[in-house]
Amino acid sequence: MTPPAGVTPVAPDEAARAEAVLAKLQLLVTRKLDGLLQGDYAGLLPGPGSEAGESREYRPGDDVRRMDWPVTARTTMPHVRRTVADRELETWLAVDLSASLDFGTAKWLKRDLVIAAATAMAHLTVRGGNRIGAVVGTGSGVPAKGSSGSWWRRKAAAAAEPPPSAPVLRLPARPGRKEAQGLLRAIAGTRIRPGRADLGALIDMLNRPPRRRGVAVVISDFLAPVEGWARPVKKLGVRHDVLAIEVVDPRELELPDVGVLTLADPESGALHEVQTSDAKLRHRYAEAAGEQRAAIARALRAAGASHLRLRTDTDWLLDMVRFVAASRHARTRGTTR
């Protein structure tokens, strides 16, 4: 398969691994998630649709902005107007494939979870003429300044690679499972390069050009500075239902006691030696990591986005199933976020 324009082709062994991982993920997703959205047509995320439906009696927790005043006046009982989702749903993915995603110390690499999340979203939304598209961002291919003599620079010099192509790939939204398969293969076949993608600019690409209301899914580890992407996510949530999928590795939350570790920053190439036997250092690391994740959660909550965290050391598919089931439960009860 010829890679789309803007995609740096991966090596044959990497391509084979990506294809094998994608095939395994599709099988898992089909077995576990098939049937979760059967029944009345509804969007992936809880919340009101955009087309007027029937009225029903008001229940505590309903949005008062949906009050049906004519029916309320005729029946003398408060009623709210139900809304239904559009018959065709358009879903866009913002997929972050920065160098920090090429990391994992448990069952999966973080980039595998990114592909898994994209596969699940495609499976859940590509039905009945729904369309799915994506913007994929990766590093610039050049390590950050100040990393002269780093591992990344030595590797680049030894490989003598050609100049990197554009770090952002746009895959247009198209209906059909075949098109969705091509989109997933393009994501899985995108080569991760040194550096960090501009997550804020990547998310902002979902706002241009303006589209009708739909679902926007941001898949990233959100390790970029919060102030760089919080505003674009909030802007995206004004018009669309936003789902933020955060991928996390346990070593990003706490350090094991294994003596001296030599760590390489995948984005800058800088090397650091860490004495993990120091209990105080491990405690400070865990505290800093907890504060960082709390700041990410606060920013997403302030933007009105649904937040799903997937870990490389747990059953990510079970977490996905629980999230979708909870979304369906909230929607059928008529509650709002």
Image: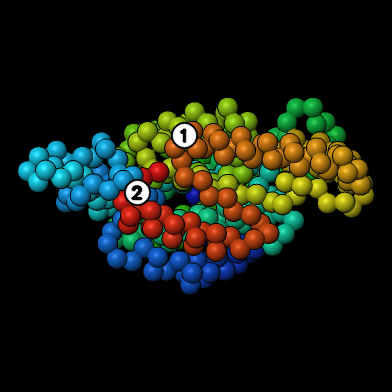
**SS under mark 1:** loop
**Circle 1 residue:** 303
Q: Position of residue 21 (x, y in %)?
A: 60, 64
Residue 95 vs residue 145, the one in the foreground: 95
Residue 128 horizontal side relative to residue 126, left or right: left
| Nearer the observer, 98 or 291 | 291
Counting other residues with Cα less than 10 Å from the Cα at mark 2, is it few (<14), some (14-19), or many (20 or more)?
some
Q: Is residue 273 visible?
A: yes
Q: Please say whether residue 156 is visible from this viewpoint.
A: no
Residue 19 lies, with reference to residue 196, above or below; the image says: below
Of residues 275 and 70, the one nearer the viewer is: 70
Q: Find numbered disc 2 in the image and state the secondary structure of the residue it sits on.
A: loop
Residue at 53% across, 69% down? 28
Residue 294, position as x, y percentages in the image: 62, 38
Where on the picture, by quarter, is residue 290? top right
* Residue at 25% over, 36% down: 65
Label disc, if present, on residue 335 of the rendered structure:
2
Q: Is residue 113 above or below residue 242?
A: below
**Which residue is pictured at 37% across the width and 50% down the height?**
46
The disc labelled 1 sits on which kind of residue?
Ala
Amino acid at the residue labelled 2: Thr
Compared to residue 264, the image places residue 39 above or below, namely: below
Q: How many marks?
A: 2
Q: Residue furthest left?
A: 74
Measured as percent of width and height from the top left, residue 322 is found at: 49, 60
**Relative to residue 162, is residue 126 drawn left or right?**
left
Image colouring: rainbow
Q: Residue 160 vs residue 186: left or right? A: right
Residue at 52%, 31% (x, y): give it.
Answer: 230
